[in-house]
Image (cartoon, rainbow, N blue to C red):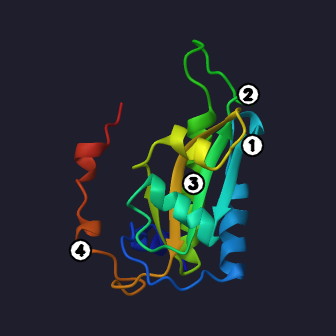
Amino acid sequence: MEFNDVIKNRYACKKYDGTPVAKEALDAILAAGRLAPTAKNLQEHHVYVIQSEEGLKKVDELTPCRYGAPVVLMVTYDKTNVFTYPGGVATSGIEDATIVATHLCLAATANGVENCWLNYFDPAKAKALFGLPENEEVVLLMDLGHAADVPAGQPLANHASRKPLTETVTYL
């Protein structure tokens, strides 16, 4: 799939049919995340692939937004291995994890796998429930699977509803 088609057709899938994601597709998705740029190339992110029955039950404890997806990716970052920006207030952790996640969701679409970026959950509870190391911060969950109601390439009607560039871009 051409890149412009990927970004045009990617949408937040809200109902999965439960069929497994092919290993080849999952491997390609994870490889794309690995290629994402990070500040100073620190690569402080970590992606957990949740697909066991036990793991998915834990996700269901965290959020009502799994929507029947057979795979959920949990994207975290190592808070002890981040770049601190000038001013000392912000670090690269969340930013880099979201760049990785963007690569993951676009690669999923390119590989015929629907996805949904989830942030409706308590990151501290996710960290505790999955027993993650103290230095890791959970940024998001991402559903992966095959749509139950929306055929591939046919995103929801409101997906195409976008503000004009004149409202979202300013040239200085």
What is the C-alpha distance between the residues marked 4 and 1?
A: 36 Å
Q: Position of residue 96 (x, y in %)?
A: 62, 41
Instruction: Name the amino acid type tagged 4.
Output: Ala
Q: From the viewer's perspective, is 158 left or right of 133?
A: left
Q: Secondary structure at mark 1?
A: loop
Q: Establish if 98 lies above or below 65.
A: above
Q: Establish if 167 lies above or below 102.
A: above
Image quarter of residue 68: bottom left
Q: From the viewer's perspective, is 15 left or right of 97?
A: left
Image quarter of residue 108: bottom right
- Is residue 100 something that shows in the picture? no
Q: Which mark is residue 80?
A: 2
Front residue (pair 123, 73): 123
Q: Position of residue 16 (x, y in %)?
A: 43, 78
Q: Secondary structure at mark 2?
A: loop
Badge 1 is on which residue? 43
| Residue under the image location 67 percent in, 54 percent down | 47
